[in-house]
């Protein structure tokens, strides 16, 4: 099994299966922490997450943002803490907008990116990073496919050359395609079809809760669709979406910005742009009635339940309010649902979830999204009993309101999680946010505005958000019916 941290999953610092990952290699780098440089200040004041949430933000991530003539978005964020650099390339293509008769194609193509390019043969990209003491990975998410390398600082030029080499062109052969079709189909079998609770709820819930096909299809891929992919599909997909004007390049770590800019221009500057298709309509209709579904699981021996509510539009006041409500209701042992379902009722041992749960964080997506929670529970507990507790906790928030003190406590948790994100995995957590904000907002400096946006949320905005987005008619329920013979 391959693993990657579940980035910015508030209060959780655990590992989850990288179900869309192509390669993970052993690391010999030492972990980094982040510190302001260049555009802010040379010294980094230690972050005290116990301070009151109303304190003014003191930390700024250095952001140097520009674009090449071919449209490539470039973000530089120097950090001299340790002699390590992270190079991340994000392409603005995820499984949400893959072709309708080619489910799982975005993920399949991610695997193809490791099969060789003009100057690097099959597996040589991976070996290049590994032999230089680094780690690398790739993954496919709702709205992007990403690739990153974390290496000793003196290998920055090598990594930029290698990433540019495969952006220029892949070794697309029938042999490579057939091989990777088998690999991906095996992933589907191992991660979904042949294990208890496979795909629950991260793969299942979007298909039940959403109505727009682009948000609601099996993005891991139907086996027949994976088999149907051909060389022409792969070549067209690469030419269309894997172009510099559909990508962002982020460099985080110990490097000299001017030298990095020269290398970026040298290796990426001559790659031609492509003509991108018109954006796909991803909008979801307002949900007016609660939806309930049951799914039989032949391998599960206990029932499980997931709930999902459609999120507010990204970057609105209500969006940030949902981030705080997520902290209050679901994140950590002090959350209201954990206290009610685990501590008081004893229905389950844990309840987990979040915004964009299990496939990213509340910042690195760019379309309709769900706030979701799930739990496994004993057979003598009814699903209705669990939903009654959920309704009671939401009703209590609406009836009693949320004080500024409670908002401040939620803000402390958000702030702590955000700072964890910025320093996670040798700087990759920081690179993830910078790349996402460059792709989706054309503004990677937004990374320094997040705290302020959360602090704008008032108790009145919270109440408005609860009323519209935590109503039962905005909810989808999925119950796993266990079928395993004990």
Image: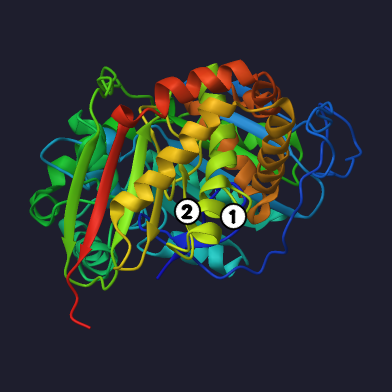
Q: Quadrant of residue 435?
A: top right
Q: Height in image: 211 above or below 256?
A: above
Q: Earlier in the sequence, mark 1 or mark 2?
A: 1
Query: Badge 2: how crowded within 10 Å, few (<14), some, or many (20+)?
Result: some
Q: Which residue is mark 2?
A: 352
Disc 2 secondary structure class = strand
Instruction: Please say which color scheme the image uses.
Output: rainbow
Who is closer to the viewer here, 394 or 368? 394
Image position of 69 (left or right of 423):
left
Quadrant containing the N terminus in the rendered view: bottom left
Marks 1/2: CA–CA distance: 10 Å
- What x and y, as percent, mark residue 57? 80, 29
Q: Nearer the viewer, mark 1 or mark 2?
A: 2
- What x and y, as percent, mark residue 198? 27, 62
At 63% from the left and 28% from the top, the residue drawn is: 402
Q: Is residue 205 visible?
A: yes
Quadrant containing the C terminus in the rendered view: bottom left
Q: Quadrant of residue 300?
A: bottom left
Image position of 458 (left or right of 392):
right
At 33% from the left and 58% from the top, the residue drawn is: 115
Which mark, residue 189? none
Disc 1 secondary structure class = loop
Task: Check the image and name the residue furthest to the bottom.
Answer: 486
Q: Which residue is mark 1?
A: 12
Q: Quadrant of residue 125?
A: bottom left
Image position of 471 (left or right of 154):
left
Tell me if label 1 and label 2 are in contact, CB under 8 Å: yes
Q: Height in image: 37 above or below 301?
A: above
């Amino acid at each position: 099994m391959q693993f990657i941290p579940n980035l910015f999953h508030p209060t959780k610092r655990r590992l989850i299966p990288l179900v869309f990952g192509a390669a993970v290699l052993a690391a010999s780098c030492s972990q980094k922490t982040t510190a302001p440089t260049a555009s802010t200040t040379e010294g980094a004041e230690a972050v005290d997450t116990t301070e009151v949430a109303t304190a003014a933000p003191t930390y700024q991530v250095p952001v140097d943002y520009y674009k090449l003539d071919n449209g490539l978005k470039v973000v530089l964020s120097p950090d001299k803490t340790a002699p390590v650099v992270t190079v991340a390339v994000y392409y603005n293509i995820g499984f949400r907008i893959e072709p309708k008769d080619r489910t799982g194609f975005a993920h399949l193509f991610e695997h193809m990116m490791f099969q060789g390019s003009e100057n690097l043969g099959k597996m040589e990209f991976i070996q290049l990073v590994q032999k230089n003491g680094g780690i690398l990975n790739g993954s496919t998410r709702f709205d992007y496919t990403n690739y990153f390398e974390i290496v000793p600082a003196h290998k920055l030029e090598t990594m930029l050359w290698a990433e540019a080499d495969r952006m220029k062109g892949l070794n697309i052969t029938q042999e490579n395609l057939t091989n990777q079709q088998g690999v991906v189909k095996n992933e589907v079998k191992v991660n979904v079809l042949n294990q208890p609770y496979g795909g629950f709820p991260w793969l299942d819930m979007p298909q039940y809760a959403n109505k727009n096909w682009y948000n609601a299809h099996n993005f891991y891929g139907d086996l027949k669709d994976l088999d149907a992919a051909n060389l022409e599909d792969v070549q067209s997909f690469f030419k269309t979406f894997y172009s510099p004007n559909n990508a962002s390049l982020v460099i985080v770590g110990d490097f000299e910005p001017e030298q990095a800019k020269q290398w970026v221009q040298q290796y990426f500057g001559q790659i031609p742009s492509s003509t991108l298709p018109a954006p796909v309509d991803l909008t979801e209709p307002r949900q007016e009635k609660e939806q309930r579904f049951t799914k039989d699981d032949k391998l599960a021996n206990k029932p499980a339940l997931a709930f999902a509510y459609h999120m507010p539009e990204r970057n609105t006041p209500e969006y940030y309010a949902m981030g705080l409500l997520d902290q209050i209701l679901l994140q950590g042992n002090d959350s209201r649902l954990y206290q009610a379902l685990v501590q008081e009722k004893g229905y389950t041992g844990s309840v987990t979830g979040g915004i964009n749960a299990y496939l990213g964080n509340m910042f690195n997506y760019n379309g309709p999204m769900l706030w979701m929670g799930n739990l496994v529970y004993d057979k003598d507990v009814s699903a209705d009993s669990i939903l009654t507790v959920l309704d009671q906790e939401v009703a209590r928030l609406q009836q009693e309101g949320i004080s500024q003190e409670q908002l401040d406590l939620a803000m402390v948790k958000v702030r702590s999680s955000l700072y964890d994100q910025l320093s996670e995995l040798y700087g990759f957590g920081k690179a993830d946010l910078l790349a996402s904000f460059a792709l989706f907002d054309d503004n990677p400096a937004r990374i320094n505005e997040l705290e302020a946006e959360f602090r704008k949320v008032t108790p009145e905005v919270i109440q408005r958000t609860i009323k519209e987005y935590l109503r039962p008619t905005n909810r989808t329920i999925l119950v796993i019916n266990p079928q395993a013979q004990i």
